[in-house]
């Protein structure tokens, strides 16, 4: 009996000792792992001054490269992200979203690995399909205002209030608008603002600290008001010269791009002067535009358009699978079903095509962040691709040859892409959120080029 009790006590001692050993070993292992993680964090060698850098919140050189944090405006609010670069200042190590308020299960996917992992190991700048990374390309999009200014020179202005609005939201989801009042033949009031899809105004957001460009310096509202006042004082746009990026040094304290302000103000002034623009003439013919790559379901979308006697007479939007099958036929046969009730994909594509023929332009087709529209009854599918491809066809018919270059990276002599940087796929249905993220990443890269 005593031997059994003794063996029991010894067994208990052994088990207790082993337990303490396991606990101690776990603590040592945890300490080692924590130490390894700490060692993986790059030590900061130098912190850079980011004052005056639009959207850049912090930047530093580390022992492993560089880290830059940027803030940009997304669809639901600010997006803050940190980008880590290799020592070359161009190869991206990682992108981490620190803050975002995008739509759940849509724009919020920009914070998920499926989207962010695309950035690891690629060369900056980055771009979405159809998005240019070249500063010279962006500059070429800035309107040439010299001819318009000449037309407006010494033009008599009729009293009234005039309004101009951008044709589409910018990459941050804001639609810019300008109101101009003329009294006794003189410009007496100018208001330039930008309205978000939720009705919020950039002027109010900037005043409340919800739209911040830099911690110091004039707010967006203060800069827009300074521009408006300068126009009233000068009574013309002749004074407002810009550089390639659309910025000006003609108005003290204004650091934002003023290209849109100039364009919208010109529209108002032309209306006040009674100057009407002739509609763009379309050349008869058949035009085709095709997506540069298949979508996530393997379909490549395309639009065919016919112009006769200067008017759009026929439009077809379809998507072709890798096996040659057409989405229109598949939906008609019940092989491509979106919902059990409601119009088929083919019926919706035909409704869009008919609406374009009736309107003879795409101005009527407004969209939300997911690319959907309420401008055409019965259409519930995303129409972003239709708009893009139809616009390409309209541009071809108008004799504008830059359309394809604006939507595809030009090929070099060996057939590769001549556009600098790396293409990133957007989150499906979240164009604004994806564009904001890519724009912020490029902002961190551009900043690095000024300091390294």
Image: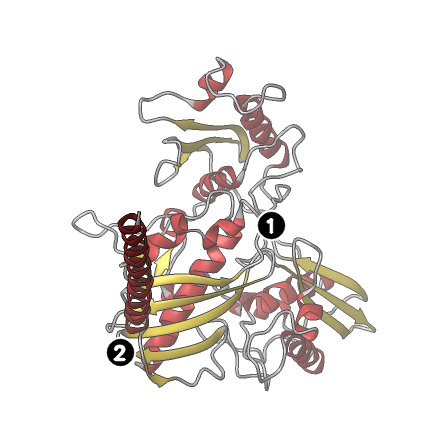
Furthest residue in direction right, as rendered = 184
Q: Quadrant of residue 35?
A: bottom left
The residue wearing badge 1 is: 278
Left or right of 188? Residue 338 is left
- Disc 1 packing (10 Å; few <14; some 14–19; many ≥20): few
Query: Helix, strand, or loop for circle 2?
Result: loop
Give above or below for 351 relative to 385.
above
In the picture, residue 15 is in which quadrant?
Answer: bottom left
**Residue lying farthest top?**
333
Q: Which numbered marker is on residue 440? A: none
- For label 1, the SS is loop
From mark 1 to mark 2, how far is it between C-alphas?
60 Å
Q: Position of residue 161 (x, y in %)?
A: 79, 63
- Which residue is depicted at the point 21% across and 49% down? 416
Identify the residue position indicated by label 2 in the image: 63
Number of numbered discs present? 2
| Residue at image point 33% right, 66% down | 27
Q: Is residue 130 visible?
A: no
């Amino acid at each position: 009996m005593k031997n059994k009790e003794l063996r029991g006590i010894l067994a208990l001692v052994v088990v207790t000792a082993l337990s303490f050993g396991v606990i101690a070993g776990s603590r040592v292992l945890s300490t080692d792992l924590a130490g390894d993680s700490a060692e993986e964090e790059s030590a900061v060698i130098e912190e850079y001054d980011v004052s005056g850098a639009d959207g850049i919140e912090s930047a530093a050189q580390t022992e492993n490269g560089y880290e830059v944090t940027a803030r940009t405006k997304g669809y639901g609010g600010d997006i803050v992200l940190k980008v880590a670069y290799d020592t070359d200042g161009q190869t991206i190590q990682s992108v981490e979203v620190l803050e975002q308020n995008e739509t759940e299960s849509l724009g919020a996917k920009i914070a998920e690995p499926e989207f962010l992992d695309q950035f690891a190991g690629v060369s900056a700048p980055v771009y979405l399909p159809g998005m240019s990374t070249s500063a010279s390309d962006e500059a070429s999009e800035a309107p040439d205002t010299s001819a318009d200014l000449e037309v407006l020179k010494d033009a008599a202005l009729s009293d009234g209030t005039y309004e101009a609005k951008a044709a589409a939201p910018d990459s941050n989801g804001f639609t810019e608008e300008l109101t101009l009042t003329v009294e006794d033949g003189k410009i007496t009031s100018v208001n330039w603002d930008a309205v978000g899809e939720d009705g919020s105004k950039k002027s109010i957001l900037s005043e409340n600290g919800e739209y911040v460009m830099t911690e110091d310096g004039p707010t967006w509202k203060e800069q827009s008001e300074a521009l408006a006042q300068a126009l009233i004082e000068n009574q013309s746009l002749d004074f407002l010269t810009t550089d390639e990026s659309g910025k000006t040094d003609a108005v003290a304290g204004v650091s934002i791009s003023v290209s849109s302000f100039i364009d919208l103000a010109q529209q108002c002034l032309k209306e006040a002067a009674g100057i009407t623009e002739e509609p763009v003439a379309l050349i008869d013919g058949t035009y085709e535009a095709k997506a540069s790559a298949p979508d996530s379901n393997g379909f490549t979308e395309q639009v065919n358009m016919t112009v006769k006697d200067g008017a759009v007479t026929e439009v077809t939007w379809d998507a072709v699978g890798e096996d040659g099958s057409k989405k229109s036929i598949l939906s008609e046969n019940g092989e491509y079903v979106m919902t059990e009730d409601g119009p088929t994909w083919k019926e919706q594509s035909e409704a869009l095509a008919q609406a374009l023929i009736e309107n003879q332009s795409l101005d009527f087709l407004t969209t939300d962040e997911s690319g959907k529209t309420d401008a055409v009854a019965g259409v519930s599918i995303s129409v972003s691709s239709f708009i893009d491809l139809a616009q390409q066809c309209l541009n071809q018919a108008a004799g504008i040859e830059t359309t394809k270059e604006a939507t595809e990276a030009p090929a070099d002599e060996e057939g590769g892409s001549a556009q600098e940087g790396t293409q990133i796929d957007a989150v499906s249905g979240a164009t604004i959120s994806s564009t904001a993220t890519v724009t912020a990443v490029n902002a961190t890269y551009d900043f690095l080029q000024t300091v390294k």
